[in-house]
Amino acid sequence: MVYGNEIHVSHTWIYFLGQAMTILISRFFAGRLYDVKGHRFVIIPGILSMALGLIVLSMAWNAPSLFVAALIFGLGYGMTQPALQALAVERAAPDKIGAANGTFLSGMDLGMAIGSFGLSLIATYSNYSFMYLSSITALIVLALTYWFTIGKSRVVH
C-alpha cells in the first residue's frame, strides 16, 4: 500500500485484514436489519460509516489507526453494498431481476473504474491522505441520490 509509505507504516496488511473482517461480520446482521427495518436502516448508517472510515483513514498515522479505519469503512461497505443490490433486485419486475442485478454490478464496475482514475489524479497532484478524504464526495453523491430517489419514501414492512 503506497499510503503506508506516505505515512511511514510498513504493516499496511492490517488494513485489509480489518476491512475483510468487518465486511464478513456485517453480513450477519445487515441482511436481517434490512428485512426487519427496511433499507433506510442499513444504507444510511452504512454510508455514514464508510465516510467516517475514510476520514479516519485520511488521518491515519500508524498501523492501529489503519486498522480502526478499516473496521469502520468495512462495516459500512459490508452493510451498504448488499443492501443496495437487494434494493435494486427488490424493485425490479420479476422478469427483469437478472437485468437489474447486471445493471447494478455494471454500475459498480463503472464507478470503480472512473473513481480509480479520478482518485489517481488526485493522489498524483496532492497526496493519498487528501485522496481518501476527497473520495467522500462519491459517498455524498450516493447519499443524496439515494435520499431523493428512494430513501425518504415511507418504509413499508
Image (spheres, helix red, strand yellow):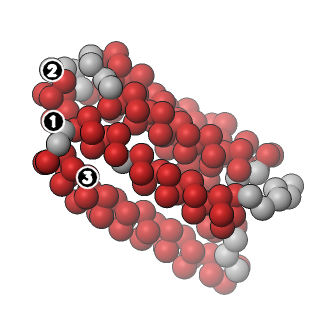
Determine the secondary structure under disc 2.
loop
Compared across the picture, whether 151 is left or right of 8 comes to right
Quick one: label 3, few (<14), some, or many (20+) residues within 10 Å?
some
> Which image quarter is the N terminus in?
top left
The residue shown at (42%, 22%) is 68
Q: Amino acid at mark 3?
A: Leu
The one nearer the camera, 143 or 24, is 143
Which one is closest to the eye, mark 3 or mark 1?
A: 3
In the rendered structure, the answer to whether residue 110 lies left or right of residue 139 reads left
Nearer the observer, 116 or 103? 116
Q: Mark 3 and mark 2 in contact? Answer it, CB < 8 Å.
A: no
- Amino acid at dot 2: His
Q: Which mark is residue 153?
A: none
Element carrying mark 1? helix
What is the quadrant of the C terminus in the image? bottom right
Task: Name the quadrant containing residue 45.
Answer: top right
Measured as percent of width and height from the top left, residue 25 is found at 55, 32
Relative height, residue 136 to residue 13 (above, below): below
Q: Label 3 belongs to which residue? A: 119
- Residue underneath mark 1: 2
Whether residue 21 appears in this view of the structure is no
Kindly state the secondary structure of the residue where label 3 is placed: helix
* Rendered location of residue 12, percent (x, y): 24, 26
Compute the Cα span from label 3 to label 2: 21 Å
First of labels 1, 2 by sequence position: 1
Q: Earlier in the sequence, mark 3 or mark 2?
A: 2
> Quarter of the image holding residue 33?
top right
132, above or below 21, in the image: below
Q: Circle 2 sits on which residue?
A: 8
> Label 1 neighbourhood size at 10 Å, few (<14), some (14-19), many (20+)?
few
- Please indicate, yes or no, whether residue 121 appears anywhere in the rendered image: yes
